Image (tube, coloured by chain):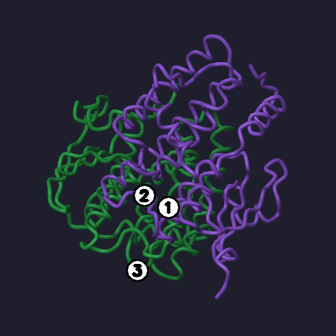
Chain colours: A purple, B green
Amino acid sequence: MAERSEEVKLLGMWASPFSRRIEIALTIKGVPYEFSEQDITNKSALLLQLNPVHKMIPVLVHHGKPISESLVILEYIDDTWQNNPILPQDPYEKAMARFWAKFIDEQICVAAMKVVGKTGEEKDAAVEATRDLLKFLEKELVGKDFFGGKNLGFVDIVATLIAFWVMRTEEIVGVKVVPVEIFPEIHRWVKNLLANDVIKKCIPPEDEHLRYIKDRMVKLIIKPA
Amino acid sequence: MASGEVKLIGSWASVFVMRARIALHLKFISYEFLQETYGSKSELLLKSNPVHKKMPVLIHSDKPVCESNIIVQYIDDVWNSSGPSILPSHPYDRAIARFWAAYIDDKWFISLRSILTAQGEEETKAFIAQVEERTELLEKAFIDCSKGKLFFNGDHIGYLDIALGSFLGWLRVVELDANHKFLDETKTPSLTKWAERFCNDPAVKPIMPEITKLAEFARKLFPKPQG
């Protein structure tokens, strides 16, 4: 019988939220995988071959077949390995989970990025816009340990982008985009995440992560606050 | 779960609404079609989709589902024993269908729409070139996905057919406006044949908007500068 670990390969990048979410999903499912760290500033021939359309990580390779786009990969993982389901079984709850995941990636992520490198009124406006979107997620968490309910689910995995990228970089960006006074539920949820073994294992180590982000901002000629 | 009243908030002209309608037709679901008036948003729409305030919204047993591709998957999940399967059955094929559906919305559609809002000839030409390039990718995707069959999904129309096919009316409107064909027998032979089959499918034909009516609507939405 072939080693399971030979079947699954992940092309990723240690500091990318989109790559880390795949590692979280594979770890939840107990699927061994080979991780191939990619240099996104100098893309490998392998990456370009496996994701010619977007030329981006993460790419999951299973039985030699590549899958790209993190949300597509997450659904593939859930479809393929049925233990520890990530998406809810109920069709309505599943639709809601997909809705929030899309909202996080297409709205919150984009809005939060707009805060970076801005100053004064422009910065304030970008912060307000991000907070307005986050308020929807704040409401979703009321009475729940995780977006997925009692356990980590699809939306939690996607929302790690907020917990460990948006919120972690507040000091660097120079503004508390997600203050506890306005977002107590989100803060409570982050504490729940940090108590979870899979999350602890799969998120980038904080110091190294912050150093990397500061470094990148300098390279992109953005002044860290 | 499959019982319960079904309503759809939408408009005859919307690509995204069309996706939901095709899915409902494929599954033989009766629904109340609540058409929005152009230029205003109904109370029901604002209440049912407070996050985006956009159509389509499917309301099933009073519970709203938003985002066209999510609605299509929801319909497939709920009415799974009715009509053909909309999503492919194999996880890998599903992933490929989802990948291209996302590409269509995030890349292809954005370029297409940009042709209508482009300022000046240079900009228009650039977007036309972009749509050409992206349509070529979709031609290849069709060949890969269909595996010699009639539709992206095989023998019957499915998720990816619906995702792209719903754009065919608007695509024709843009082609006429830009005086440029994106789908044609020499450049995109497979997609061209597929497009005709798709438009003639019984689940699609009754709701595909008439091109002249759509073109008139497009002129309202994207007015050309005077002079």
Task: Please state if B144 lies on the left or on the right of A143 as rendered.
Answer: right
> Tag 1: residue type?
Glu
Residue B17: % across, % down: 33, 49
Asked whether B76 or A1 is in front, the reply is A1
Q: Which disc number belongs to residue B155?
A: 3
Q: CA distance from mark 1 to mark 2?
A: 8 Å
Q: Quadrant of the C terminus of chain B?
A: top right
What residue is shown at x 50% (from left), y 71% (from top)?
A80
Q: Chain of mark 3?
A: B
Residue B45: % across, % down: 27, 36
State if disc 2 and disc 1 touch (CB < 8 Å): yes
- Which residue extends farthest bottom? A1
Q: Reading the chain from its start, which is encountered first: label 1 or label 2?
A: 1
Q: In the image, is residue B215 above or below residue B167?
A: above
Asked whether B147 or A96 is in front, the reply is A96
Q: Which residue is mark 1?
A: A75
Q: Chain of mark 1?
A: A
Q: Which disc number belongs to residue B97?
A: none
Q: Nearer the viewer, mark 1 or mark 2?
A: 2
